[in-house]
Amino acid sequence: MSPQEAVSLISTYCGLRYGGNWTAMAKEAQKEGLQVNLYPSSKYQLSDGGQGVAYDVTAGEKSQGLVYTVNNDDVNIYQNVKENQKSTKLATISKSEMANYVNQEGQGKLVNDLAAKAQVVDKRSSDSNSSVSTSNSGNDHKYGRIGTIDVPSEMQGTWYSADNDSDSTMTFGPHSYTYSDGDNSGTTQLYKQDPQWAQDEDNYTNEGIQNATKNWGKVSYLNIDGKRWLNVRGWTQGAGDGDSYAVKTETVDGKAS
């Protein structure tokens, strides 16, 4: 399930199940498009912050206090959320249970329609609660960086994994990604690296540079088997292939996902 499909499923379910602002937002999203803004869950006083990301769902730029957090497949649902005010979740329900309910109500097409135009916007790096500074565009040539990387829109959002029997999430923003496995998490800012700077091996072994750039990722694009992969390596990484990512559609039980 893509990030766009996930927020569309959750919004449709909440509109059907809880009424009020959730229903009004879901109806408005059919005309204006659905958007979910990602913030650190610490931005709000939520009874369950999930895995550290608060998903603020709107049908426009202005927050309507409709928020959810996730714990692997489970979703914690809130409404009327405001900063500096405690919020208790309405319910916790799995995405599979949501899908069953939506299908029973005959609203599967609405999920697909909303997902087609849904936008996922990572606002954590610009939030005052974020520990990651992105005060410039990354083109100041400091430590060899010559600009930020634009993550493809279809890749932006939160992806779920169960590799090595451990549940984890990978959240891509416009210029960053955040990994979380429940116990550990970290955000990496994605930049282009100046090839001339990289030719000086001393830059890669300088301890001061290593510490200053430990949260930076060096990005290149690879074309493999007709697909374009986003490859990320440590800023001062020498050997090793790094990690590569691409969006691929699979057919599961006769459905594309």
Image (cartoon, rainbow, N blue to C red):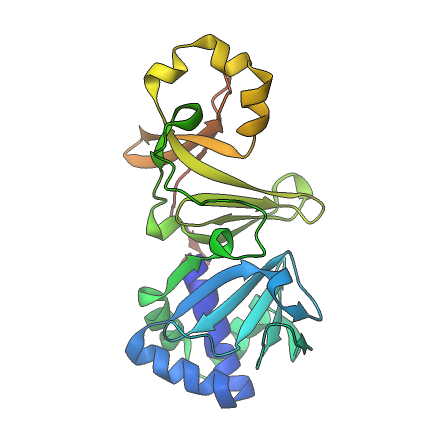
* Depth check, front residue: 3 or 63: 63
Q: Does residue 40 lie above or below 241 as drawn?
A: below
247 versus 70 height, above or below: above
Residue 129 appears in which quarter of the rendering? bottom right
State whether residue 249 appears in this view.
Answer: no
- Position of residue 98 relative to residue 234, above or below, is below
| Residue 35 % position (x, y) | 39, 68
x and y percentages locating residue 241 in the rendered image: 47, 22
Residue in view at x 65 percent, y 38 percent: 164
Q: Quadrant of residue 26?
A: bottom left
Q: How many marks?
A: 0
Camera sees residue 36:
yes
Q: Position of residue 166 (x, y in %)?
A: 67, 44
Left or right position of 96 against 12: right
**Quarter where residue 34 is shown:** bottom left
Residue displayed at 35% across by 52% down: 154
Q: Quadrant of the C terminus?
A: bottom left
Q: Position of residue 206 (x, y in %)?
A: 55, 15
